[in-house]
Image: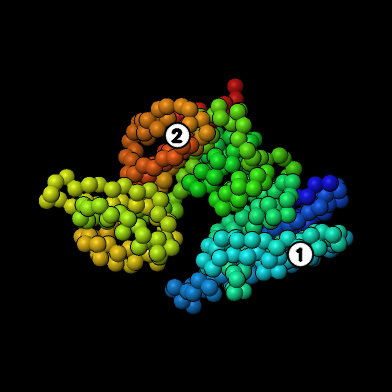
Amino acid sequence: MALLVQKFGGTSVGTVDRIRNVARRALATQRAGHRVVLTVSAMSGETNRLLALAHEITKIPSAREMDVIAATGEQVTAALTSMAIQAEGGQASSLLGHQVRVLTDNAFTKARILSIDKERIFEALDRGEIAVIAGFQGADEHGNITTLGRGGSDTTAVAVAAAIGADECEIYTDVDGVYTTDPNICASAQKIERISYEEMLELASLGAKVLQIRSVEIAMKYGVPVHVRTSFNDTPGTLVAKEDSALEGMVVRGVAYDKGEARAHVVGLEDRPGLAAELFEKIAEANISVDMIVQSAAADAESRAGITFTLPKSDLARGRTWIDSIAKGLGAREVRYDEDVVKVSIVGLGMRSHAGVAAKMFRLLAREGINIQAISTSEIKVSCLVASKYTELAVRALHDGFGLSAPKASV
Protein backbone atom coordinates (compact mmCIF):
# COMPACT_ATOMS: atom_id res chain seq x y z
CA MET A 1 0.00 0.00 0.00
CA ALA A 2 1.43 3.37 -1.06
CA LEU A 3 0.61 6.79 0.33
CA LEU A 4 0.07 9.08 -2.64
CA VAL A 5 -0.64 12.78 -3.06
CA GLN A 6 -2.39 13.66 -6.31
CA LYS A 7 -2.69 17.26 -7.42
CA PHE A 8 -5.09 18.38 -10.16
CA GLY A 9 -4.69 21.77 -11.83
CA GLY A 10 -7.26 24.22 -13.11
CA THR A 11 -7.86 22.64 -16.53
CA SER A 12 -8.20 19.20 -14.92
CA VAL A 13 -11.07 20.51 -12.77
CA GLY A 14 -12.34 23.10 -15.25
CA THR A 15 -15.83 21.62 -15.60
CA VAL A 16 -18.17 19.44 -13.56
CA ASP A 17 -17.48 16.49 -15.90
CA ARG A 18 -13.73 16.91 -15.37
CA ILE A 19 -14.20 17.04 -11.62
CA ARG A 20 -16.10 13.76 -11.88
CA ASN A 21 -13.15 12.35 -13.85
CA VAL A 22 -10.80 13.41 -11.05
CA ALA A 23 -13.05 11.71 -8.51
CA ARG A 24 -13.09 8.47 -10.51
CA ARG A 25 -9.29 8.53 -10.94
CA ALA A 26 -8.71 9.11 -7.22
CA LEU A 27 -11.16 6.34 -6.30
CA ALA A 28 -9.50 3.93 -8.73
CA THR A 29 -6.17 4.61 -7.01
CA GLN A 30 -7.70 4.08 -3.59
CA ARG A 31 -9.47 0.89 -4.65
CA ALA A 32 -6.13 -0.43 -5.93
CA GLY A 33 -5.07 -0.46 -2.28
CA HIS A 34 -3.45 2.95 -1.83
CA ARG A 35 -4.17 5.82 0.52
CA VAL A 36 -4.91 9.01 -1.39
CA VAL A 37 -4.68 12.70 -0.60
CA LEU A 38 -5.93 15.11 -3.26
CA THR A 39 -4.89 18.73 -3.72
CA VAL A 40 -7.00 20.78 -6.12
CA SER A 41 -6.74 24.15 -7.82
CA ALA A 42 -9.52 26.55 -8.66
CA MET A 43 -11.50 25.77 -11.80
CA SER A 44 -9.76 27.07 -14.91
CA GLY A 45 -10.20 30.85 -15.26
CA GLU A 46 -11.85 31.27 -11.86
CA THR A 47 -8.92 32.96 -10.11
CA ASN A 48 -8.59 35.49 -12.93
CA ARG A 49 -12.33 36.19 -12.71
CA LEU A 50 -12.13 36.77 -8.97
CA LEU A 51 -9.11 39.07 -9.21
CA ALA A 52 -10.75 41.03 -12.03
CA LEU A 53 -13.66 41.77 -9.72
CA ALA A 54 -11.25 43.21 -7.18
CA HIS A 55 -9.66 45.46 -9.81
CA GLU A 56 -13.10 46.72 -10.79
CA ILE A 57 -13.45 48.04 -7.26
CA THR A 58 -10.01 49.63 -7.02
CA LYS A 59 -6.91 49.90 -9.17
CA ILE A 60 -4.59 48.90 -6.31
CA PRO A 61 -6.55 46.53 -4.04
CA SER A 62 -5.37 45.46 -0.59
CA ALA A 63 -3.13 42.40 -0.82
CA ARG A 64 -4.80 40.91 2.27
CA GLU A 65 -8.27 41.19 0.77
CA MET A 66 -7.03 39.86 -2.56
CA ASP A 67 -5.99 36.67 -0.78
CA VAL A 68 -9.41 36.35 0.87
CA ILE A 69 -11.04 36.61 -2.55
CA ALA A 70 -8.61 34.38 -4.47
CA ALA A 71 -8.71 31.54 -1.93
CA THR A 72 -12.43 30.95 -2.53
CA GLY A 73 -11.74 29.40 -5.94
CA GLU A 74 -9.96 26.41 -4.41
CA GLN A 75 -12.57 26.18 -1.66
CA VAL A 76 -15.29 25.62 -4.24
CA THR A 77 -13.28 22.99 -6.13
CA ALA A 78 -12.39 21.07 -2.96
CA ALA A 79 -16.04 20.85 -1.93
CA LEU A 80 -17.22 19.86 -5.42
CA THR A 81 -14.53 17.19 -5.69
CA SER A 82 -15.50 15.72 -2.32
CA MET A 83 -19.13 15.64 -3.43
CA ALA A 84 -18.13 13.93 -6.70
CA ILE A 85 -16.21 11.23 -4.81
CA GLN A 86 -19.20 10.66 -2.54
CA ALA A 87 -21.53 10.48 -5.57
CA GLU A 88 -19.28 7.74 -6.99
CA GLY A 89 -19.69 5.68 -3.83
CA GLY A 90 -16.53 6.77 -2.06
CA GLN A 91 -15.82 8.69 1.14
CA ALA A 92 -14.14 12.08 1.18
CA SER A 93 -13.90 15.29 3.13
CA SER A 94 -12.67 18.69 2.00
CA LEU A 95 -10.07 20.55 4.04
CA LEU A 96 -9.19 24.22 3.60
CA GLY A 97 -5.76 25.68 4.26
CA HIS A 98 -6.57 26.87 7.76
CA GLN A 99 -8.12 23.50 8.64
CA VAL A 100 -5.16 21.36 7.60
CA ARG A 101 -3.38 23.70 8.99
CA VAL A 102 -1.00 25.16 6.41
CA LEU A 103 0.86 27.79 8.43
CA THR A 104 2.50 30.51 6.32
CA ASP A 105 4.26 33.82 6.77
CA ASN A 106 2.24 37.00 6.17
CA ALA A 107 3.55 37.91 2.71
CA PHE A 108 0.10 38.22 1.16
CA THR A 109 -0.32 36.96 -2.45
CA LYS A 110 3.05 35.15 -2.30
CA ALA A 111 3.25 33.59 1.15
CA ARG A 112 5.71 30.82 2.04
CA ILE A 113 4.74 27.69 3.96
CA LEU A 114 6.28 27.42 7.43
CA SER A 115 4.68 24.17 8.61
CA ILE A 116 1.79 21.78 7.98
CA ASP A 117 -0.22 20.02 10.67
CA LYS A 118 -0.72 16.52 9.29
CA GLU A 119 -3.10 15.33 12.04
CA ARG A 120 -6.33 16.24 10.22
CA ILE A 121 -5.09 14.55 7.05
CA PHE A 122 -4.34 11.24 8.79
CA GLU A 123 -7.64 11.40 10.66
CA ALA A 124 -9.44 11.47 7.31
CA LEU A 125 -7.28 8.67 5.89
CA ASP A 126 -7.84 6.51 8.98
CA ARG A 127 -11.59 6.86 8.42
CA GLY A 128 -11.10 5.42 4.94
CA GLU A 129 -11.66 8.79 3.28
CA ILE A 130 -9.86 10.58 0.50
CA ALA A 131 -8.66 13.88 1.97
CA VAL A 132 -9.33 16.69 -0.52
CA ILE A 133 -7.17 19.71 0.30
CA ALA A 134 -7.75 23.16 -1.17
CA GLY A 135 -4.44 24.12 -2.74
CA PHE A 136 -2.83 27.56 -3.06
CA GLN A 137 -3.89 28.74 0.39
CA GLY A 138 -2.90 28.80 4.02
CA ALA A 139 -3.14 31.04 7.07
CA ASP A 140 -0.62 33.10 9.00
CA GLU A 141 -0.12 33.05 12.77
CA HIS A 142 -2.90 35.62 13.20
CA GLY A 143 -5.43 33.55 11.23
CA ASN A 144 -5.33 35.73 8.12
CA ILE A 145 -5.96 33.85 4.89
CA THR A 146 -2.88 33.81 2.66
CA THR A 147 -2.15 32.51 -0.83
CA LEU A 148 1.07 31.06 -2.21
CA GLY A 149 1.32 32.80 -5.59
CA ARG A 150 0.51 31.58 -9.06
CA GLY A 151 0.79 27.81 -9.30
CA GLY A 152 0.67 27.59 -5.51
CA SER A 153 -1.37 24.39 -5.55
CA ASP A 154 1.77 22.58 -6.74
CA THR A 155 3.53 23.88 -3.65
CA THR A 156 0.68 22.78 -1.40
CA ALA A 157 0.74 19.28 -2.89
CA VAL A 158 4.49 18.75 -2.58
CA ALA A 159 4.60 20.28 0.92
CA VAL A 160 1.76 18.00 2.04
CA ALA A 161 3.58 15.02 0.49
CA ALA A 162 6.71 15.95 2.44
CA ALA A 163 4.77 16.48 5.68
CA ILE A 164 2.96 13.13 5.58
CA GLY A 165 5.89 11.13 4.15
CA ALA A 166 4.12 10.26 0.90
CA ASP A 167 5.74 7.76 -1.45
CA GLU A 168 5.13 10.01 -4.45
CA CYS A 169 3.43 13.25 -5.44
CA GLU A 170 1.61 13.08 -8.76
CA ILE A 171 1.03 16.43 -10.46
CA TYR A 172 -1.79 16.12 -13.00
CA THR A 173 -2.00 18.89 -15.57
CA ASP A 174 -3.02 19.54 -19.18
CA VAL A 175 0.35 18.40 -20.56
CA ASP A 176 1.74 14.88 -20.35
CA GLY A 177 5.11 15.76 -18.87
CA VAL A 178 8.09 18.09 -19.03
CA TYR A 179 9.39 18.83 -22.53
CA THR A 180 12.76 19.97 -23.81
CA THR A 181 11.04 23.27 -24.62
CA ASP A 182 7.57 24.66 -25.23
CA PRO A 183 5.95 22.41 -27.90
CA ASN A 184 3.75 25.35 -28.94
CA ILE A 185 6.88 27.13 -30.16
CA CYS A 186 9.01 24.19 -31.24
CA ALA A 187 7.18 21.24 -32.79
CA SER A 188 10.26 19.04 -32.44
CA ALA A 189 10.29 19.30 -28.63
CA GLN A 190 10.58 15.94 -26.86
CA LYS A 191 9.10 14.72 -23.58
CA ILE A 192 11.73 14.11 -20.91
CA GLU A 193 11.25 10.80 -19.06
CA ARG A 194 13.35 11.74 -16.02
CA ILE A 195 14.85 15.03 -14.90
CA SER A 196 16.81 16.05 -11.81
CA TYR A 197 15.47 18.37 -9.14
CA GLU A 198 18.23 20.86 -9.97
CA GLU A 199 17.39 20.99 -13.67
CA MET A 200 13.66 21.22 -13.00
CA LEU A 201 14.24 24.00 -10.49
CA GLU A 202 16.19 26.02 -13.04
CA LEU A 203 13.62 25.41 -15.79
CA ALA A 204 10.77 26.40 -13.47
CA SER A 205 12.56 29.57 -12.37
CA LEU A 206 13.32 30.47 -15.98
CA GLY A 207 9.78 30.36 -17.32
CA ALA A 208 8.78 26.72 -17.77
CA LYS A 209 5.14 26.62 -16.62
CA VAL A 210 4.83 22.94 -15.68
CA LEU A 211 5.76 23.27 -11.99
CA GLN A 212 5.94 26.19 -9.59
CA ILE A 213 9.47 26.99 -8.39
CA ARG A 214 8.71 26.63 -4.70
CA SER A 215 7.22 23.16 -5.21
CA VAL A 216 10.46 21.95 -6.79
CA GLU A 217 12.52 23.49 -3.97
CA ILE A 218 10.47 21.58 -1.39
CA ALA A 219 10.63 18.35 -3.39
CA MET A 220 14.41 18.62 -3.62
CA LYS A 221 14.86 19.51 0.06
CA TYR A 222 12.76 16.59 1.32
CA GLY A 223 13.44 14.10 -1.48
CA VAL A 224 9.83 13.84 -2.66
CA PRO A 225 9.57 12.07 -6.05
CA VAL A 226 7.28 14.14 -8.28
CA HIS A 227 5.55 12.57 -11.29
CA VAL A 228 4.24 15.14 -13.79
CA ARG A 229 1.51 13.64 -15.97
CA THR A 230 -1.74 14.42 -17.73
CA SER A 231 -5.17 13.90 -16.21
CA PHE A 232 -6.68 13.00 -19.59
CA ASN A 233 -5.03 9.59 -20.10
CA ASP A 234 -2.85 7.03 -18.31
CA THR A 235 0.38 7.77 -20.22
CA PRO A 236 3.50 7.92 -18.00
CA GLY A 237 4.83 11.45 -17.69
CA THR A 238 8.09 12.89 -16.36
CA LEU A 239 9.64 11.83 -13.07
CA VAL A 240 11.41 14.61 -11.18
CA ALA A 241 13.91 12.97 -8.84
CA LYS A 242 17.52 12.90 -7.64
CA GLU A 243 20.22 13.17 -10.29
CA ASP A 244 22.08 10.12 -11.51
CA SER A 245 25.05 9.47 -13.81
CA ALA A 246 22.84 9.21 -16.90
CA LEU A 247 21.41 12.68 -16.30
CA GLU A 248 24.88 14.19 -15.82
CA GLY A 249 25.84 13.06 -19.32
CA MET A 250 23.34 15.42 -20.95
CA VAL A 251 24.97 18.82 -21.59
CA VAL A 252 21.70 20.70 -22.22
CA ARG A 253 18.37 19.24 -21.12
CA GLY A 254 16.00 22.03 -21.99
CA VAL A 255 15.40 25.53 -23.30
CA ALA A 256 13.12 27.89 -21.36
CA TYR A 257 11.84 31.41 -21.92
CA ASP A 258 10.17 33.96 -19.69
CA LYS A 259 8.11 36.87 -21.01
CA GLY A 260 7.27 38.01 -17.50
CA GLU A 261 10.42 40.10 -17.08
CA ALA A 262 10.86 43.86 -17.40
CA ARG A 263 14.15 45.75 -17.61
CA ALA A 264 15.03 48.82 -15.53
CA HIS A 265 18.07 50.93 -16.40
CA VAL A 266 19.20 53.40 -13.74
CA VAL A 267 21.21 56.10 -15.53
CA GLY A 268 23.72 58.62 -14.23
CA LEU A 269 24.80 57.24 -10.87
CA GLU A 270 27.93 58.18 -8.99
CA ASP A 271 30.54 55.46 -9.42
CA ARG A 272 31.43 54.64 -5.79
CA PRO A 273 31.69 51.62 -3.46
CA GLY A 274 28.44 50.56 -1.81
CA LEU A 275 26.16 52.11 -4.42
CA ALA A 276 24.73 48.79 -5.65
CA ALA A 277 24.20 47.64 -2.05
CA GLU A 278 22.20 50.77 -1.23
CA LEU A 279 20.08 50.49 -4.36
CA PHE A 280 19.15 46.83 -3.99
CA GLU A 281 18.70 46.92 -0.22
CA LYS A 282 16.06 49.61 -0.66
CA ILE A 283 14.40 47.69 -3.51
CA ALA A 284 14.31 44.57 -1.30
CA GLU A 285 12.51 46.59 1.39
CA ALA A 286 9.63 46.91 -1.07
CA ASN A 287 9.59 43.09 -1.45
CA ILE A 288 10.58 43.38 -5.12
CA SER A 289 12.71 40.54 -6.49
CA VAL A 290 15.38 41.34 -9.06
CA ASP A 291 17.14 38.92 -11.36
CA MET A 292 19.74 39.87 -13.95
CA ILE A 293 22.04 42.70 -12.89
CA VAL A 294 24.53 44.53 -15.11
CA GLN A 295 26.60 47.41 -13.73
CA SER A 296 28.51 49.69 -16.08
CA ALA A 297 31.33 51.60 -14.44
CA ALA A 298 32.19 55.21 -15.27
CA ALA A 299 34.74 55.46 -18.07
CA ASP A 300 36.49 58.43 -16.44
CA ALA A 301 36.15 60.91 -13.60
CA GLU A 302 33.72 63.05 -15.57
CA SER A 303 31.25 60.30 -16.55
CA ARG A 304 28.59 58.55 -14.50
CA ALA A 305 27.81 54.87 -13.95
CA GLY A 306 24.66 52.92 -14.70
CA ILE A 307 22.94 49.81 -13.34
CA THR A 308 20.56 47.62 -15.32
CA PHE A 309 18.42 44.93 -13.71
CA THR A 310 15.34 42.88 -14.45
CA LEU A 311 12.27 42.42 -12.28
CA PRO A 312 8.89 40.73 -12.71
CA LYS A 313 6.45 42.72 -14.82
CA SER A 314 3.87 41.98 -12.14
CA ASP A 315 5.95 44.04 -9.69
CA LEU A 316 6.56 46.93 -12.07
CA ALA A 317 3.20 48.68 -11.64
CA ARG A 318 3.53 48.99 -7.87
CA GLY A 319 7.32 49.18 -7.84
CA ARG A 320 7.97 51.81 -10.48
CA THR A 321 7.29 54.80 -8.22
CA TRP A 322 9.36 53.21 -5.46
CA ILE A 323 12.31 52.54 -7.79
CA ASP A 324 12.15 56.07 -9.22
CA SER A 325 12.23 57.49 -5.70
CA ILE A 326 15.18 55.32 -4.69
CA ALA A 327 17.13 56.22 -7.81
CA LYS A 328 16.48 59.93 -7.31
CA GLY A 329 17.65 59.68 -3.71
CA LEU A 330 20.91 58.15 -4.94
CA GLY A 331 21.46 60.99 -7.41
CA ALA A 332 20.50 59.15 -10.61
CA ARG A 333 19.60 61.18 -13.66
CA GLU A 334 16.69 58.94 -14.70
CA VAL A 335 15.34 55.38 -14.80
CA ARG A 336 14.39 53.86 -18.15
CA TYR A 337 12.03 50.90 -18.35
CA ASP A 338 11.51 48.31 -21.08
CA GLU A 339 8.80 45.64 -20.97
CA ASP A 340 9.44 44.32 -24.50
CA VAL A 341 12.09 41.83 -23.42
CA VAL A 342 12.27 38.08 -22.89
CA LYS A 343 14.73 35.90 -21.01
CA VAL A 344 15.81 32.77 -22.92
CA SER A 345 17.79 30.11 -21.09
CA ILE A 346 19.50 26.76 -21.50
CA VAL A 347 19.69 24.26 -18.61
CA GLY A 348 21.67 21.08 -18.09
CA LEU A 349 23.69 19.25 -15.42
CA GLY A 350 26.33 18.51 -18.05
CA MET A 351 27.38 22.16 -18.12
CA ARG A 352 29.36 21.48 -14.94
CA SER A 353 31.89 19.41 -16.87
CA HIS A 354 31.69 20.81 -20.42
CA ALA A 355 33.47 24.00 -21.48
CA GLY A 356 32.27 26.37 -24.18
CA VAL A 357 28.52 25.93 -23.65
CA ALA A 358 27.90 29.65 -23.06
CA ALA A 359 30.03 30.60 -26.06
CA LYS A 360 28.03 28.24 -28.25
CA MET A 361 24.77 29.78 -27.01
CA PHE A 362 25.98 33.30 -27.82
CA ARG A 363 27.10 32.18 -31.28
CA LEU A 364 23.75 30.52 -32.04
CA LEU A 365 21.91 33.74 -31.15
CA ALA A 366 24.37 35.87 -33.12
CA ARG A 367 23.81 33.77 -36.24
CA GLU A 368 20.14 34.75 -36.09
CA GLY A 369 20.99 38.45 -35.66
CA ILE A 370 19.76 38.50 -32.05
CA ASN A 371 21.46 41.04 -29.80
CA ILE A 372 22.02 40.11 -26.15
CA GLN A 373 21.10 42.82 -23.62
CA ALA A 374 22.13 41.03 -20.41
CA ILE A 375 23.55 37.69 -19.32
CA SER A 376 23.31 35.66 -16.13
CA THR A 377 24.72 32.22 -15.35
CA SER A 378 24.77 29.52 -12.73
CA GLU A 379 26.53 26.17 -12.57
CA ILE A 380 23.89 24.51 -14.76
CA LYS A 381 22.24 27.33 -16.73
CA VAL A 382 22.92 30.32 -18.97
CA SER A 383 20.29 33.04 -19.52
CA CYS A 384 20.24 35.88 -22.05
CA LEU A 385 17.90 38.87 -22.15
CA VAL A 386 16.81 39.72 -25.70
CA ALA A 387 14.07 41.72 -27.42
CA SER A 388 10.72 39.93 -27.11
CA LYS A 389 10.16 39.93 -30.88
CA TYR A 390 12.91 37.29 -31.12
CA THR A 391 11.34 34.84 -28.64
CA GLU A 392 10.38 32.05 -31.02
CA LEU A 393 13.46 32.45 -33.20
CA ALA A 394 15.78 32.31 -30.19
CA VAL A 395 14.09 29.25 -28.65
CA ARG A 396 14.17 27.28 -31.90
CA ALA A 397 17.76 28.23 -32.64
CA LEU A 398 18.95 27.07 -29.22
CA HIS A 399 16.78 23.94 -29.18
CA ASP A 400 18.05 22.80 -32.59
CA GLY A 401 21.60 24.03 -32.02
CA PHE A 402 22.02 21.93 -28.88
CA GLY A 403 20.58 18.81 -30.51
CA LEU A 404 17.36 18.60 -28.49
CA SER A 405 14.98 18.17 -31.42
CA ALA A 406 13.22 14.87 -32.00
CA PRO A 407 14.64 12.95 -34.98
CA LYS A 408 12.70 13.41 -38.18
CA ALA A 409 10.75 10.40 -39.34
CA SER A 410 12.18 8.72 -42.41
CA VAL A 411 10.07 8.82 -45.55
Q: Quadrant of residue 317?
A: bottom left
**Residue type at numbered disc 1:** Arg
N-term mark: 1 or 2: 1
Which residue appears farthest toward the top when viewing the image?
411
Q: Quadrant of residue 150?
A: bottom right
Residue designated by label 1: 120
Residue designated by label 2: 398
**Residue type at numbered disc 2:** Leu
Question: 363 or 291: which is nearer to us?
Answer: 291
Which residue appears farthest toward the left when viewing the image?
302
Number of marks drawn = 2
Q: Is residue 162 left or right of residue 293?
A: right
Q: Is residue 384 left or right of residue 219?
A: left
Q: Residue at x 55, y 27 (%)?
A: 249
- Residue 160 versus residue 249 in the image, above or below: below
- Residue 402 versus residue 278 in the image, above or below: above
Residue 386 percent coordinates (x, y): 36, 44
Q: Is residue 88 left or right of residue 145?
A: right
- Badge 2 marks a residue whose secondary structure is helix
Quarter of the image with the C terminus in it = top right
Can the viewer see residue 346 in this picture? no
Question: 194 or 87: which is nearer to us?
Answer: 194
Residue 382 percent coordinates (x, y): 43, 38
Q: CA distance from mark 1 to mark 2?
A: 48 Å
Please name which of the two marks, 1 or 2, marks the residue nearer to the observer.
Answer: 1
Residue 9 percent coordinates (x, y): 65, 55
The label number, if any, that marks residue 324 in the structure image:
none
